[in-house]
Image (cartoon, helix red, strand yellow):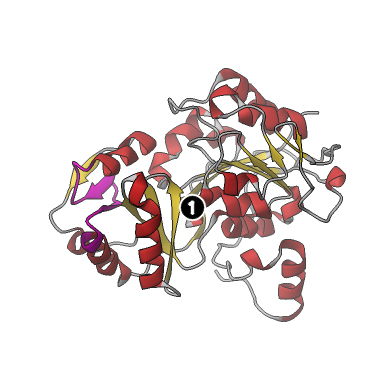
Amino acid sequence: MFWGSGGEWEDRREMERGPAAKNFTEIHAGGLRRAGRSLYNKHVTEKFDTIGGEEYPARKEQDMSKTKIRVLALDLDGTLTNDEKIVTPRTRAALDAAAAQGVTIVLASGRPTAGITPLAKELGLDKKGGCILAYNGGKIVDCATGEALYQKQLAPEFVPQLCKFAAAQDVAILTYDDRGIVCERDGDEWARKECVTTKLEMYHVDDLASYVDYPICKMLITVAPARRDAVCEAGKAQFEGRIDLYPSSPFFIEAVPLGVAKDASLGALLDRMGLTRENLMACGDGLNDRSMIEFAGVGVAMQNAEDAVKQVADYVTAADNNHDGVAEAIEKFILQ
C-alpha cells in the first residue's frame, strides 16, 4: 500500500520529521503488534551538551528535556554487539528493562534479514515484540509476526551494472539468496568478512548478474580499507541520481535503491505507530548510522564511532561497544 500524498498530510509529516523521510511511503497498512504492552512515556531530563565528558553544543533546537523515548533503534556491529558479535549481560539487562517499560526495540543493520533474525530471537523480540530493520532500511519486519512492514527493492537493471562496475574496480560484490550470501569471488578476504558479520554461509556463483533473477534489496561491494573511499566516489559518480552508494564499514560499500537509509525507514515506522522522531532514540557507530542518529529525538554515537557520526550526535557514550556503551545510553535516557 502507498500512503496518500499531497497537501495537509505531507505538510504535517515534513514539519514533524523533516524532509529526510518525505519520499518513503512504501509501507503496508495495519498496526504494529505491541504484544499487549503500552508504549513508554518516560521523560528524558538532561540536556545533551557533552561528548565523552567534554562540552558540546546541543544540535537540536527543540527542548530535549521533554523527549519521550518510545522506540529504540540500535545498530548491531560496533554498537549493540561487542567485537566478538555478542550482546553482553549488562546490555541485555538494559534492553530487557527498556522492553518491560514498553519501548519498541528495532535492530537496525545493513545485514540481510536472515543475518539479524537469530539475534532478534536471542533477545526475545519474537515474543516481546520488536522489529528488524534490514538492508540499511530497505526492509522492516515485525519480529512477532514475520510481516514485512516496509520494503524497497533494487531495480533489476542495476544488478549487471553494479557487477560490471565491481569488475572494473577489481573488487568483490555480493548479495543474498534464501541460502545465504552469493558471490563470484567467494574466496575474497573482504567478502568473507560478511560471513563473520552475518553468520551466514557464502556460496560461489559463476555469474552473479545472471544468477540474480529474483528481487533483492541491496548489493554489497567489499574492498580493502585503503581503497574504500576512492571506489565509493567512483560508484557515486557513475550511478548518481539512480541508486545510492555509501560506506557502512572500513571495507563495505552499500549499493541500495535511491534514498534508502535508516532514517527514512524509521520515519515510516514511526508514522505507522502514530509517533514522531522525538519519540525515537537511535544508537550507532558507522557512517550508515549517521542519518538515523541525526534524525532521532535522541541521537547517540558510540565512543568507537567515526568522527563524522559523533559530530551529529546529541550524546557520545563514555564506553565503547566492548564496554556496554548501549547499556550506558539506555540507563541514562530511558531507565532513569
Quadrant of residue 162 in the image? bottom left
Could you say where residue 271 lies in the image, as x and y percent from the top left? 68, 59
The region drawn magenta spans: 167-188
Vertical comparison of 8 with 68: above or below: below
Identified by mark 1, the residue type is Asn
Residue 235 in sight: yes
Q: Is residue 48 left or right of residue 93?
A: right
Residue shown at the point (45%, 27%) measured from the top left:
83
Tag 1: Cα neighbours inside 10 Å, few (<14), some, or many (≥20)? many
Q: Which of 268 and 3 is in front in this view?
A: 268
Quadrant of residue 307 in the image? top right
Q: In which quarter of the image is the C terminus?
A: top right
Task: Kindly identify which residue carries mark 1.
Answer: 136
Q: Is residue 99 left or right of residue 159?
A: right
Q: Does the magenta stretch include residue 180?
A: yes
Quadrant of residue 22 in the image? bottom right
Q: Determine the residue located farthest toward the left in the rendered image.
A: 206
Q: Does the magenta stretch include residue 230?
A: no
Residue shown at the point (55%, 33%) measured from the top left:
80
Residue 30 in sight: no
Q: Which of 204 and 187 is in front in this view?
A: 187
Q: Quadrant of the N terminus?
A: bottom right
- SS category of the residue bearing label 1: helix
Q: Which of 169 and 325 is in front in this view?
A: 169
Residue shown at the point (53%, 36%) measured from the top left:
126
Could you say where residue 75 lies in the image, as x and y percent from the top left? 54, 41
Could you say where residue 279 lies in the image, as x and y percent from the top left? 75, 48
Could you say where residue 146 lies in the image, as x and y percent from the top left? 48, 46
Residue shown at the point (66%, 58%) measured from the top left:
272
Vertical comparison of 265 with 320: above or below: below
Vertical comparison of 132 with 94: above or below: below
